[in-house]
Image: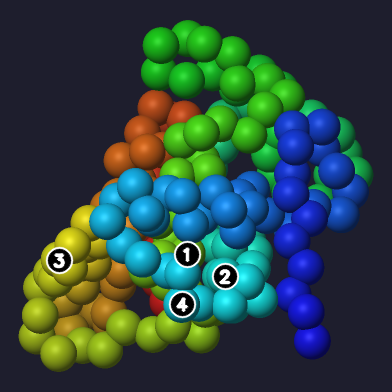
Amino acid sequence: MAITIILEDGTGLTNSTSYVSIAEFKAYWTQNGVDYTAETDDTIALWVNNATKYADDYYCYGGSVANDDQALLVPRIGWYDARGNSLDDSVPTQLKNAVCEIAGIRKTTRATTETTGIKSKTVGPMSVTYGSASIGARVTYTGANAYMKGLLCSGGGMTALPR
């Protein structure tokens, strides 16, 4: 079964599934020294679709949705970056990069974090931080959060729990 990506183009599509294409995902990771060419397009499509949904579930974007019937939470109106530039009717590069980061780390919606006593682990450009065993394992998407800094609601952030 082929996994379909319907790329949000900034117009508020009613059926979009992702903020990034397979080509954008591969280009992002190639630029960061990680080779995903051995992965099938269907696999990457699943990753980016799931990462997009995950970002929409956990980020608090500024402004409001551009169209009431759009499938995803972006594009938005009344949304500005930290420098005051309007992000209206667009999918910001920072969000695209954050989705690539989440997809590269999380890979599927069923990803779990084992509590092994490891506080943090860095492999190449990816970093995962685990929480205390007493409160359950937590994953912080450090790279994704760095991209989203300045684009989130006041006090917004993402410390996401594995599903």
Of circles 4 and 3, which is in front?
Answer: 4
Q: What amino acid is found at the position of numbered circle 3 in the picture?
A: Thr
Q: Earlier in the sequence, mark 2 or mark 1?
A: 2
Q: Nearer the viewer, mark 4 or mark 1?
A: 4
User: Which secondary structure, mark 2?
Assistant: helix
- Image quadrant occupied by the N terminus: bottom right
Give whichever of discs 4 and 3 has the lower sequence position. Answer: 4
Q: Which mark is residue 122?
A: 3
Callout 2–callout 4 Cβ contact below 8 Å: no
How far apart in space, not on screen, are marks 4 and 3 (Cα)? 22 Å
Secondary structure of the residue carrying numbered label 4: loop
Image quadrant in which you'd find residue 147? top left
For the residue carrying disc 4, how many other residues have a C-alpha within 10 Å: few (<14), some (14-19), or many (20+)? few
Give the alpha-carbon distance from disc 2 to disc 1, as whole Å.
8 Å
**Residue at the disc numbered 1:** 103
Asked which quadrant contains residue 74, the reply is top right
Identify the residue under disc 4. Answer: 38
Identify the residue at image location x=55%, y=49%. 24
Q: Earlier in the sequence, mark 2 or mark 3?
A: 2
The residue sitting at the front extreme is 37
Instruction: Report which residue position mark 2 lands on.
Output: 44
Asked if 120 appears above or below 53 in the picture, the reply is below
Residue at image position (87%, 54%) is 15
**Mark found first going from the N terminus, 4 or 1:** 4
Q: Position of residue 150 (x, y in %)?
A: 39, 27
Q: Amino acid at mark 2?
A: Ile
Q: CA distance from mark 3 to mark 1?
A: 16 Å
**Measuring 74% from the left and 61% from the top, which residue is drawn there?**
5
The answer to whether residue 87 is above or below residue 141 is above
Q: Residues within 10 Å of mark 2 (few under 14, many from 20)?
A: many
Q: Position of residue 62 (x, y in %)?
A: 57, 30
Q: Position of residue 119 (x, y in %)?
A: 10, 73
